[in-house]
Amino acid sequence: MTATAAKTERITILGTPQFKAFLTGEAKREGISVSELIRRRCQHRQQERDEDLLLSLAAEVRTATKKAQSALDKGLLDAEQALAELRRGAP
């Protein structure tokens, strides 16, 4: 093994024959080993969570932006009405 090669350790997991068949089928469908399938699925889980969180935050920002825009529009309308009344000389 070279100095730059990643060290690996054997991990043994217990599962039902159906679970093993599922893992084997998924790995075969993706053209990778069962070990690679498990590595990819576990490593990408956090990335998926982060993406879900970002999507949720983006939705909240869109909602808050719409509310802020509505409040600004109302404030501008109120200011324009007040200026119009002042121009007409209304108290």
Image (cartoon, helix red, strand yellow):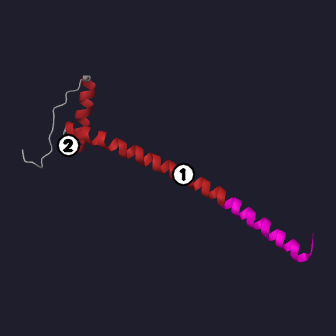
Picture residue at 24% right of the left edge, 44% below the top: 30
Pick the residue in front: 63 or 32: 63
Q: Which residue does the numbered mark 2 point to in the structure image?
A: 32
Relative to 86, residue 23 above or below: above
Relative to 72, residue 51 above or below: above
Query: Is residue 70 part of the magenta span, yes or no?
Result: yes
Mark 2 falls on what kind of element? loop
Which of the 4 image quarters holds residue 1? top left
Pick the residue in front: 71 or 24: 71
Gap between marks 2 and 1 measured at Cα: 36 Å
Which of the 4 image quarters holds residue 24? top left
Q: Main secondary structure of the magenta part?
A: helix
- Circle 1 residues within 10 Å: few <14, some 14–19, many ≥20: few
Relative to 40, residue 65 above or below: below
Residue 74, percent across and down?
Answer: 74, 62
Which of the 4 image quarters holds residue 81? bottom right
**Residue 85 in the figure: left or right of residue 62:** right
Q: Which residue does the numbered mark 1 point to in the structure image?
A: 59
Picture residue at 27% right of the left edge, 31% below the top: 22
Residue 44, percent across and down?
Answer: 32, 44
Picture residue at 88% right of the left edge, 71% below the top: 85
Pick the residue in front: 18 or 55: 55
**Residue 28 in the figure: left or right of residue 81:** left
Magenta extent: 69-91
Relative to 45, residue 82 above or below: below
Picture residue at 12% right of the left edge, 49% below the top: 4
Q: Which image quadrant: the C terminus?
A: bottom right
Query: Is residue 16 part of the magenta span, yes or no?
Result: no
